[in-house]
Amino acid sequence: MSNQAILQSLRNIVGKEFATDVYEERSCHSYDASKQTGLPDYVVSPGSTQEISKIMKLATSKLIPVYPRGAASGLTGGSVPTRGGIALSLLRLNRILEIDDRDLIAVVEPGVVTAALQKEAAKQGLFYPPDPASYKFCTIGGNVAESAGGLRGLKYGVTKDYVLGLEVVLPNGEILNFGVRTLKGVVGYDLTRLFVGSEGTLGIVTRVTLKLIPLPEAKETMEVYFPTIQDAAATVSRIIGEKIIPTTLEFMDKETIDCVSGFLKKDYPDELAAILLIEIDGDPDVLDKQLNKVKKICLANNSIQINMARNDREREALWAGRRAISPAIYTLGGAKINEDICVPRSKLPAMLDRIDQISREHNLTIVNFGHAGDGNIHVNLILPHNFTDTDKQNGLAAIEKIFDATLELGGTISGEHGIWLSKAAYLGKEIGAREIKLMKQVKRLFDPHNIMNPGKIF
Ligand SMILES: Cc1cc2nc3c(=O)[nH]c(=O)nc-3n(C[C@H](O)[C@H](O)[C@H](O)COP(=O)(O)OP(=O)(O)OC[C@H]3O[C@@H](n4cnc5c(N)ncnc54)[C@H](O)[C@@H]3O)c2cc1C
């Protein structure tokens, strides 16, 4: 079948305007936020599950690779069409189908933007907590495929903790339903969980049933300055040790602070070496007590300044520093290698020491920030402007040492961004050969012709 004939078949399914092979469209669908690229042969934007089913049947019969795609904010190349084929945009499936305030459930299509769901739920006093920092533009489908984490993971968990059920289309076009509409359900294997975090390699998620919870009544936000990263890390351990679980417990190291300071044109005290952004939420009475305890712990661990937000405007201002990190880091060098290791939270200080040592050994700037309460560190190795192949190899050698140190400390090489292209070569460091073999068998069961996001994970 010629390319033109395939395009015509795709247009017969979705309509002329929603399937194209125009270069500009293909180019716009050739990358994600990792900046890795791969040009698809076609860009297709289906409008229903039935259309997706027909596309998948066609793709299977012609052995055409299919790359599902939400907002392409992924940081590991997940939606990048590395072997041509179809870039399948799910953005037209963007309806919130149901928010049930008695059963505390939402049913949504995969192209719904995470922030849009949160806004709609809040109108009914309900809360969908998972909030990747990209929440204003990433989609629920992408979140499910990545089991996206976020800033509230410490208290509220990550995407996988909220997915109750899924409608999916398999590579052969079959439409299946997994999971439940109830909080409990143990009938059969948990195929919902298998799909969550499967990085678009098993099938297309076309509908998601999510758990909601009541919106917390109140929240308090503070930004705390520390003279050393060890003081900040000790504060994190002490807060958790006191059985206080903040909604957010984010840290920024000295390099991150300098970078954000330049980017936002904001001055921080010279003696500052680490910042914790702490948010707690819940019942206002309990909150007051917790707030006092947290402040005492910060002071006991040498904090040099505590900035409390007195209203939403001030809260936003405190959050602005955290949100500026990603764009700010891009200004530091020619490129960054971005990893998201996760260690048991008690091992955070040891891990930061190891990273510091590796940065000196490799003469590299490494910027660390992330979800301190989860032990999840976003490690950014900055390659110089006009970097050479040797610089890149130096960065990759440093990354390998960081992964080794992470695993030695009992951690994992990805807390939330996934494996995809970026980390496929390191999978065997963390997962045993037999376990990988079993995973490949599972993949073959769902996708015997390897058309579903091929070239990823393994
Ligand atoms: C500034 C910034 C901040 C970020 N912060 C965080 C963070 O705090 N925590 C975090 O976890 N991540 C974070 N990310 C990464 C990213 O936003 C998340 O992984 C997000 O879940 C991706 O959603 P998306 O809609 O952009 O998916 P895409 O990038 O389009 O796709 C991601 C993967 O999901 C697959 N996929 C998409 N839709 C479907 C579907 N319907 N069915 C099957 N597979 C599908 C794709 O094939 C791809 O493999 C951040 C990214 C940026 C740019």
Image (cartoon, rainbow, N blue to C red):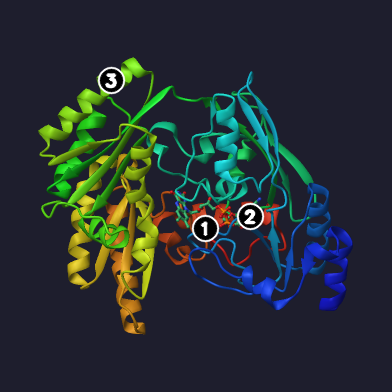
Inspect the image, locate mark 1, and give the three-letter code of the amino acid beneath it.
Gly
Q: Percent position (x, y) of residue 53? A: 81, 52
The quarter holding residue 285 reads top left
Q: CA distance from mark 3 to mark 1?
A: 38 Å
Horizontal relation, residue 8 to residue 81: left or right = right
Q: For the residues carrying marks 3 and 1, which lies nearer the camera in this image?
A: 3
Q: For the residues carrying marks 2 and 3, which lies nearer the camera in this image?
A: 3
> Which one is earlier in the sequence, the residue at label 3 or at label 1?
1
Of residue 99 and residue 83, the one placed in the foreground of this image is 99
The residue where tag 2 is placed is 443
Queried on whether the Cβ of the residue with tag 1 lies below 8 angstroms from ligand 1, the answer reads: yes
Q: Percent position (x, y) of residue 392? A: 35, 77
Which residue occupies 72% across, 48% down?
Answer: 93
The quarter holding residue 437 reads bottom right
SS at circle 3:
helix
> Which one is earlier in the sequence, the residue at label 2 or at label 3?
3
The quarter holding residue 231 reads top left
Q: Percent position (x, y) of residue 425? A: 45, 67
Residue 31 position (above or below residue 410): below
Q: CA distance from mark 1 to mark 2?
A: 21 Å
The residue where tag 3 is placed is 288
Of residue 6 and residue 454, the one placed in the foreground of this image is 6
Q: Which mark is residue 74?
A: 1
> Which one is earlier in the sequence, the residue at label 1 or at label 2?
1
Is any atom of residue 57 visible in this view? yes
Is any atom of residue 242 visible in this view? no
Inspect the image, locate mark 2, and give the three-letter code of the amino acid beneath it.
Lys
Q: Quadrant of the C terminus?
A: bottom right
Horizontal relation, residue 349 to residue 447: left or right = left
Inspect the image, locate mark 3, and give the three-letter code of the amino acid beneath it.
Asp
